[in-house]
Image (cartoon, rainbow, N blue to C red):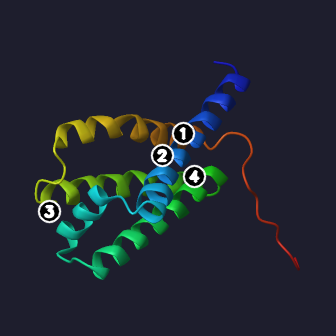
Amino acid sequence: MGAMAMNLLLLGARAAMALVWLYNGLWLKIVLRDPHHRAIVASVFGTNGWGADLALFGIGGAETLLALGIASGMASRFVNGFQIAVLLAMNVLGIAFGDGGIAHPVGLLIQNLPLVCCAALVMIQGPGPFVVRLRKYGS
């Protein structure tokens, strides 16, 4: 595979992953406050009412920050390793403590495989083009 093709693949993988986290975090958990996601969060944390809303908002905010980290390409090995760990933890917690809120646990795991593969690709190959770089001032 040529360098240009690899760069496009890496950029596409980063964009796809960032969109998944933005959709699940910003859109479903913060903007819509999706009842299904809220029910799972309430079951996992054993809370309801404002506690579930606060937890849902916090998780959505963290997912949104993760999306920005992925999109930026900064610290890509750490960010993508962290992404895999978070995804695994969220799936395990949701399945184990979600009181049946996840109707098809095996399907959930299978649906998340492409995300894990993209994260592994970026961890191994690097972030590709268009990486945000911080400037060092005063040096």
Instruction: Indicate left or right for 100 with 82 as reference.
Output: left
Question: Can you say which quadrant of the picture contains the N terminus?
Answer: top right
User: How far from the left and from the top, in percent, is residue 121?
Assistant: 50, 36
User: How far from the left and from the top, in percent, is residue 20?
Assistant: 48, 46
Q: Secondary structure at mark 1?
A: helix
Q: Amino acid at mark 3?
A: Phe
Which residue shows up at 77% across the image and 65% down it? 134
Separation of marks 2 and 3 at Cα, in angstroms: 23 Å
Q: Amino acid at mark 4?
A: Ile
Instruction: Indicate left or right for 20 with 98 as reference.
Output: right
Which residue shows up at 40% across the image and 41% down it? 116
According to the image, label 4 marks what residue?
Answer: 70
- Residues at marks 4 and 1 touching, judged by CB atoms closer than 8 Å: no
Label disc, if present, on residue 120 of the rendered structure: none
Query: Closer to us: mark 3 or mark 4?
Result: 3
According to the image, label 2 marks what residue?
Answer: 20
Q: Amino acid at mark 1?
A: Ala
Separation of marks 3 and 1 at Cα, in angstroms: 28 Å
Q: Residue furthest right?
A: 138
| Quadrant of res 50 | bottom left
Q: Does residue 96 lie above or below 46 as drawn?
A: above
According to the image, label 1 marks what residue?
Answer: 16
Q: Does residue 97 lie above or below 83 as drawn?
A: below
User: How far from the left and from the top, in percent, is residue 135?
Assistant: 82, 67
Q: Does residue 125 lie above or below 47 as drawn?
A: above
Which residue shows up at 72% across the image and 50% down it? 131
The answer to whether any part of residue 105 appears in the image is yes
Label disc, if present, on residue 97 of the rendered structure: 3
Separation of marks 1 and 2 at Cα, in angstroms: 6 Å
Q: Amino acid at mark 2?
A: Val
